[in-house]
Amino acid sequence: MIRPILIHPDPRLKKLCEPVAEITDEVKRLAADMLETMYDAPGIGLAAPQVGVTKRVLVMDCIKDGPPEPMVLINPQVVWSSEDVSTYEEGCLSIPEQYADVKRPAAVTVRWMDLDGVEQERIFEGLWATCVQHEIDHLDGKLFIDYLGPLKRQMITRKMEKLKRERARGL
Ligand code: ZN
């Protein structure tokens, strides 16, 4: 089921999300819905707070060409970050049509729990590294625009407020 994606500014996007204690049917349904919502958008990553659920769950798939590689990460944690940084032009499904360069570690090791409750660990590089860090930020109530200067951030926030008003009026 496709769930509506919250648009910034929204207090639910600023919350510190709760860890998932156990993999219930509800968590499995949430993950399936999030993947469906992400592919439909379309996007390469989505975090639970973006669909209004303040739990530490994210989904992603950074494959552009080739068979999809849907990933579900529960309680993800960065356990190692490279000193090398890389810059990507980031966007966000909660901040539609706004893009900005963000500098982050070029590679990270992330540990998480999968949908079978099994602990996983992997090194992410390139776009995957940027994506996983962007999505983990969401679980801590942080958006990519928080890395920008205050003027740029305010400008984007005003655009989003306007977009929300227009959408509320059905324009
Ligand atoms: Zn995002």
Image (spheres, helix red, strand yellow):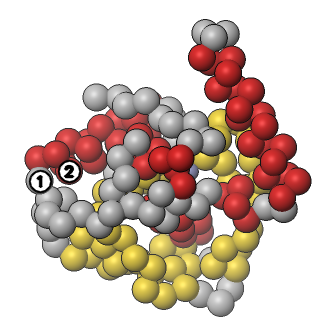
Q: Which of 98 and 6 is in front in this view?
A: 6
Q: Name the residue under label 2.
A: 27
Work out how far the residue at label 1 is from the one at label 2, CA to CA, in angstroms: 5 Å
User: Would you say the residues marked 1 and 2 are in contact, meaning their CB atoms lie under 8 Å apart?
Assistant: yes
Task: Tell me the element at label 2.
Answer: helix
The residue furthest top is: 170
Residue 85 location, quadrant: bottom right
Q: In this view, does 52 lie above or below 161?
A: below
Q: In this view, does 138 lie to the left or right of 74?
A: right
x then y, percent, for residue 96:
65, 36
Relative placement, left or right, of 85 versus 110 is right
Pointer 1 local density, CA inside 10 Å: few below 14, some 14–19, many at least 20: few
Q: Give the labeled residue for mark 1.
A: 24
Q: Residue flagged by tag 2: what amino acid is it? A: Val
Dot 1 lies on which element? loop
Which of 7 and 14 lies nearest the eye of the viewer? 14
